[in-house]
């Protein structure tokens, strides 16, 4: 059988007639009127060579081109009324039924961008983050436990205490805004609040240590050594406004702080907390990872302090650490172990 030399072009009348015909479904097609095949291939193309299947017509969904009629309009109006749309908004939704599919899609994207712009305006109009009183109270509670931890490797250098506090805040959250870590401006405010808390705690500790020796800015002289406060009384005064317990380890830490104060108080250029951190680092360096040697150094510091200041007629009884102090000690130790790693928060606090 020879192929036709020109394609068979359906008449327009046939096209319009096909629009009113029901689209046949799989397994059910109307019987041909004249006995010939009623397949789309026979209506739209010439037969192919013997044994070759003719091309199949692509049938587009009627819903893409249909406006839906009155029923669709009423359905949209009911749906809009149920969700509280304004009359003009309802009319705009109904008008979409008469638009071509791509125009409808484009309008939807326009409205999505409009919504995005409004959300951006709302976010930008939000007030600047300020830590609440409750948050600051919790931060101070944990900051004190951090400063009084016997696991502390430094009290100021590289922002180690602040890093511990921020790690704990990420766990407990309190009333922090969601995802504050992703907002650089708000996170900087939080860090600044933490720095101020630690600055105040360090100042209070230094004043207590100076006061234990009778030294004040109005009376800048040290009392006779036997008139000074002993280490146990001094340590109790330092932790008085916290939930931390007095322990032998903490008394030994305070003894180190007092020795550094005595070594530096006459030098106006000395950075007290830098010297404290330097003394701690020197002990660790000389111990070379041997915890026994570190313990011996602190034992000697405590013994020397007890012999030098006040009357050595007391016994240091270890208090029981609360759950917060135990949690903080673990967090402090982790930061100390990770000190050689990421240094994103490394800064000497003011």
Image (tube, rainbow, N blue to C red):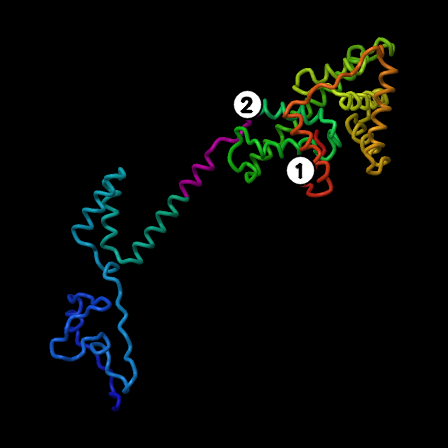
For the residue pair 253 and 19, the one nearer the viewer reads as 253
**Residue 121 magenta-drawn?**
yes
Q: Position of residue 348 (x, y in %)?
A: 72, 33
Label 1 element class: loop
Q: Nearer the viewer, mark 2 or mark 1?
A: 2
In the displayed structure image, the side of residue 217 where residue 327 appears, left or right = left
Disc number at residue 134? 2
Distance, label 2 to label 1, CA atoms, is 24 Å
Q: Looking at the image, which is closer to me, 67 or 22? A: 22
Residue ID for mark 1: 345
- The answer to whether residue 60 is above or below residue 7 is above
Q: Residues within 10 Å of mark 2 (few under 14, many from 20)?
A: few
For this rendering, which residue is in front, 313 or 102? 313
Q: Quadrant of residue 105?
A: bottom left
- The stretch in magenta equals 117-135
Q: Secondary structure at mark 2?
A: helix
Q: Quadrant of residue 136?
A: top right
Residue at x-position 25% and y-position 91%: 1
Where is residue 29 drawn, in percent x and y?
19, 70
The outermost residue toward the bottom is 2
């Amino acid at each position: 059988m020879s192929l036709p030399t020109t394609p068979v072009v359906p008449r327009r009348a046939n096209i319009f007639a096909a629009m009113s015909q029901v689209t046949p479904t799989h397994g059910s097609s109307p019987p041909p009127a004249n006995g010939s095949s009623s397949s789309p291939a026979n209506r739209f193309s010439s037969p192919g060579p013997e044994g070759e299947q003719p091309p199949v017509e692509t049938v587009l969904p009627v819903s893409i081109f249909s406006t839906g009629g009155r029923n669709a309009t009423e359905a949209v109006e009911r749906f809009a009324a149920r969700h509280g749309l304004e009359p003009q908004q309802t009319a705009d939704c109904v008008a979409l039924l008469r638009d071509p599919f791509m125009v409808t899609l484009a309008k939807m994207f326009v409205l999505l961008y409009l919504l995005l712009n409004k959300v951006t305006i709302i976010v930008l109009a939000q007030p600047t983050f300020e830590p609440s009183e409750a948050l600051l109270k919790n931060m101070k509670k944990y900051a004190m436990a951090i400063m009084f931890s016997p696991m502390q490797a430094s009290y100021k250098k590289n922002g180690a205490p602040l890093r511990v506090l921020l790690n704990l805040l990420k766990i407990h959250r309190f009333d922090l805004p969601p995802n504050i870590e992703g907002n650089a401006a708000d996170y900087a405010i939080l860090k600044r609040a933490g720095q101020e808390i630690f600055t105040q705690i360090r100042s209070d500790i230094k004043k207590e240590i100076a006061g234990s020796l009778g030294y004040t800015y109005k009376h800048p002289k040290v009392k006779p050594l036997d008139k000074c406060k002993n280490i146990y009384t001094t340590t109790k005064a330092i932790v008085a406004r916290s939930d931390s317990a007095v322990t032998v380890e903490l008394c030994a830490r305070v003894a180190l702080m007092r020795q550094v104060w005595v070594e530096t108080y006459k030098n106006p250029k000395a950075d007290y907390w830098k010297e404290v951190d330097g003394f701690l680092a020197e002990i660790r360096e000389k111990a070379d990872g041997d915890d026994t040697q570190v313990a011996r150094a602190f034992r000697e510091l405590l013994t020397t302090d007890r012999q030098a200041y006040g009357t050595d007629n007391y016994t240091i009884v270890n208090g029981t650490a609360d759950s917060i102090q135990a949690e903080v000690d673990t967090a402090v130790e982790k930061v100390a172990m990770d000190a050689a790693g990421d240094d994103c928060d490394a800064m000497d606090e003011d």
